[in-house]
Amino acid sequence: MPCRSDYPDPTIEQRRATTIAEHAVFFLNKLDLPIPQYVSVAADQPFTNTSPDRLANYLCKLIRENEFILQSLPEDEDSLKLRLWWVQHKEQDRLIELLEAEEKRKQKILNIALSKLTEEEIDILGEYI
């Protein structure tokens, strides 16, 4: 069988998972903590099946508990990449919270408006929504 070079590339989600796992391994090493197997495997395998959300939740919790240590790390490339990830992650969480709060506000207004309608008006309105 001839050698080939057309192997598939990891998906965006797999690349995100690997990157987050690499950040976690780096930070766990700095904290001198054991590395969970699923984190280690995800960091070492570009085609990981570990969810990036699972890894992000783990890393987020780890950093929240040790943020003062993150801020005191030397400014090397890995530390700066982790800090950048952390800033972006917190901003994404903030935006999601804003969107969820807005959706909750709109749902409350809708519920108030619907409570003022008769069943017949709700049925008619339902045909247009």
Image (cartoon, grey):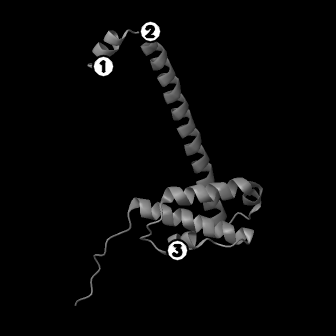
If the image is split into quadrants, where does the N terminus sit? bottom left
Q: Position of residue 19 (x, y in %)?
A: 52, 64
Q: Are marks 1 and 2 in contact (CB under 8 Å)?
A: no
Which residue has dot 2 on it? 116
Q: Residue at x 62, y 60 (%)?
A: 82
Question: What's the residue type where badge 1 is placed?
Answer: Gly
As drawn, the residue found furthest toward the left would be 1
Quick one: label 1 or label 2, which is nearer the N terminus? 2
Tag 2: amino acid: Lys
What residue sits 48% from the left and 65% below the top? 50
Residue 126 sits in quarter: top left
Q: Residues within 10 Å of mark 3 (few under 14, many from 20)?
A: some
Q: Residues within 10 Å of mark 1 (few under 14, many from 20)?
A: few
Q: Amino acid at mark 3?
A: Val
Which residue is depicted at the point 60% across and 59% down?
A: 58
Disc 1 vs disc 3: Cβ atoms closer than 8 Å? no
Q: Nearer the viewer, mark 3 or mark 2?
A: 2
The residues tagged by marks 3 and 2 sit, at their Cα atoms, a distance apart of 56 Å
Residue at 33%, 10% (x, y): give it: 121
67 sits to left or right of 40? right
- Measured as percent of width and height from the top left, residue 104 is found at 52, 28
Q: Position of residue 41 (x, y in %)?
A: 52, 74
In this rendering, the label closer to the viewer, 1 or 3: 1
Q: Which residue is mark 3?
A: 41
Residue hosting label 1:
126
Task: Report, in whole angstroms, how far the alpha carbon at label 1 lies from the one at label 3.
Answer: 50 Å
